[in-house]
Amino acid sequence: MAEESFLATVVQSTGSWYEVMYGSERLQCRIRGKLRLKGVRSTNPVVVGDQVRCEKDDQGSYVIVGIEPRRNYIIRRASNLSKESHIIASNIDQALLVVTLFSPETATEFIDRFLVTCEAYKVPVTILLAKIDLARTQPQAVEEFHSIYESAGYRIVEVSATEGEGVQEVREMLRGKTTLLSGNSGVGKSTLVAAVEPGLDIRTGEISQSHNKGKHTTTFSTMYPLSDGGYIIDTPGIKGFGLIDIEDAELAHYFPEMMRYLPDCKFYNCSHTHEPHCAVVEAVKRGEIAYPRYESYLKIMDEDDKYRK
């Protein structure tokens, strides 16, 4: 049985109740009211992956009374709330971003915003190019995708859950690590997880029915243990990925291929948009930086500027 006060890992959240793992026990906790105030800019002050201090209250229920410092996290701007953020998960070893070229097509800008966030919060990330059996009907598109992101420094793993391609490679990547799995709705995350970890159906992952409000299936992340060791954090399908707390002046630092050219810009505060003798712009013209990536950089600068003030 859990002690009067103990550290545990948050593995699921509904927004009002939190399920934590303490040893082999899974316990239901509420959050102490005053703790909630500390997350005033966040829609969720306690997130999956958090190490939390729990205590028993006078009624014998468990209450989260504190959060240990996070070593990293993935965060995005909350939907339609420009001044608030939504932390997807914390204390993760790596992120796997599942993307598809067709049925549906994952927008380049979405991919780039996710990658920027991983760079900013020091989370290693690998791109899983899913439904590759369908994508290969358009070999030029597959080749172009590899060119854009491999030249930026990212690893791409081609996978087809239905054909079994890449499944063992993903399984090995997951072993012994806490991994965040993310992507748009419809890219096949559930099918991929079922292929990697037979018997685990993330579409029907459930918590204690007495506290199930249903929100976690559309809004919150969930952590699952893997049979080979490690954990996978499944995130609901994300439509958009607004950046938050990233200043204009630092944005280029989170595009690895741009970082290589920054020291060669004439002006130390170059925005890489209009200044003369900009090494980044020159690299784009020479094809050394993929134009779709640079285009994403410009869109993020333009569209997100009002949110970063």
Image (cartoon, helix red, strand yellow):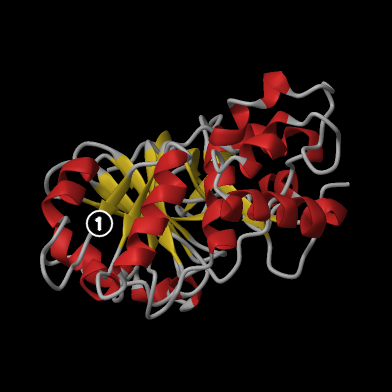
The quarter in which the N terminus is drawn is top left
Coordinates of residue 227 in the picture (x, y in percent):
12, 49
Image point (69%, 68%), residue name: 79
- Give the residue pinned by disc 1: 158
Coordinates of residue 146 in the picture (x, y in percent):
37, 51
Q: Is residue 229 above or below residue 83?
A: above
* Residue 247 in which image quadrant: top right
Instruction: Give the camera-side residue of 279 and 123.
Output: 279
Mark 1 element type: strand
Instruction: Give the camera-side residue of 196 and 2.
Output: 196
Coordinates of residue 18 in the picture (x, y in percent):
47, 57
Q: Is residue 127 above or below residue 252?
A: below
Looking at the picture, which amino acid does disc 1 mark?
Glu
Instruction: Give the camera-side residue of 293 and 163.
Output: 293
Image point (67%, 58%), residue name: 242
Q: Is residue 90 above or below residue 194?
A: above
* Residue 144 in which image quadrant: bottom left
* Residue 24 in which image quadrant: top left
Coordinates of residue 88 in the picture (x, y in percent):
53, 54
Horizontal side of 197 relative to 249 (left or right) equals left
Horizontal side of 41 relative to 198 (left or right) equals right
Mark 1, other Cα within 10 Å: few <14 / some 14–19 / many ≥20: many
Can residue 121 be spotted in the picture? no
Can residue 36 be spotted in the picture? yes
Return the residue found at the far front: 286
